[in-house]
Amino acid sequence: MPLILRPVTWRIWAVTAAVIASYVIAGLFLADNGNAEMWIFRIGITVLLVVPGVVIGLYTWTVRGAWRKNTLGLCLTGACLAFYPNTIPLSWAFWFDNGQLSASWLAWLWVSGPVTSSLILVITAIVVARMHGDQLAARKIDTVSDG
């Protein structure tokens, strides 16, 4: 059974705008409260750590584990995995080390996180570009064979 993608509606954008607005308002009111800022960051980094795994799990369940066989699934999984090199060290630091990157291995993971995430996203971009190139080549072949 193929996965059917639904169009994004205005409700999604409204909920997204409401969440962002509430986050900004909370930041304005809690700007001088270090404990509240720490908890807001802890919750945010934990959500950022959990949600990509949930997305990968749901997509894997939806396509019965065949995401590695199609380009969309591979790109979606790669984009979700790109969050982890940055979020794992920060999540560890804010939950277990009071917000300090005290361990050298943890600091190294955090410093190398953007490079690792960039490499994952570049590989994903290359896959998408090749997919687009293959579609263009298929259209050109169809055009030549039709005429």
Image (cartoon, rainbow, N blue to C red):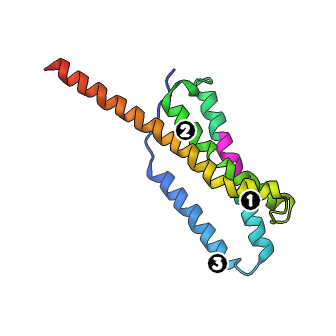
Q: Nearer the viewer, residue 68 or 103?
A: 103
- Quick one: which residue is furthest to the bottom in this view? 32
- Mark toward the start of the polypeptide (3 vs 1): 3
Q: Which residue is mark 3?
A: 28
How many marks can you see? 3
User: What secondary structure do most residues of the magenta stretch adopt?
Assistant: helix
Segment tinted magenta in the rendering: 48-54
- What SS does tag 1 mark? helix
**Splitting the image into 4 quarters, where does residue 94 fall?**
bottom right
Q: Are marks 3 and 1 in contact (CB under 8 Å)?
A: no
Residue 67, disc? none
Residue 76 lies, with reference to residue 23, above or below; the image says above
Query: Which residue corresponds to mark 2?
Result: 76
Q: Residue at x 64, y 44 (%)?
A: 52
**Residue position for label 1:** 43
Q: Residue 65's spot in the image, x, y percent?
A: 62, 24
